[in-house]
Amino acid sequence: MRFLGETANEPQAENNESTFRLPTETLENWKETKEEYFYVHRELAKILAKSEHEDLYRPIPGEDNSLVFELKSLAMHDAYHIGQIVFLSKMQGAWVEKRSF
């Protein structure tokens, strides 16, 4: 995880376009993506639970940004993509109009 200074699992690419690929097994890839998403957020919650206020403002190893900056970026990133998922679901008629939550 980049906010811990770990970059081994990050995709290596010449540019942003080359990081996009079409999945071969859509359902399995979706499951893996969700598992990774929840894993990263659980790990982040653990880090935040044991962090002091000043830890949020220290630079991330190998980065120019602080943890609080990365948290804001992650929240914006997640909100953007959740909005895309909802929009596409509605466009396809797959979005349930009435929700129980």
Image: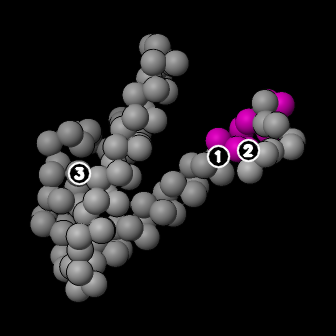
- Front label number (1 vs 3): 3
Q: Answer with the quarter of the image where residue 74 lies.
A: bottom left
Indicate whether residue 34 is drawn in magenta: no
- Mark 3 is on which residue type? Met
Q: Which residues are magenta?
A: 85-93
Which residue was labeled with disc 1?
84
Q: Is residue 3 left or right of residue 17?
A: left
Q: Looking at the image, which is closer to me, 60 or 97?
A: 97
Which residue was labeled with disc 3?
1
Residue visible at 17% across and 48% down?
Answer: 7
Mark 2 touching mark 3, by CB under 8 A?
Answer: no
Residue visible at 23% across and 74% down?
Answer: 51
Mark 1 touching mark 2, by CB under 8 A?
Answer: yes
- Mark 2 is on which residue type? Phe
The answer to whether residue 48 is seen in the rendering is yes
Q: Residue 58, how many percent across, how many down?
A: 19, 80
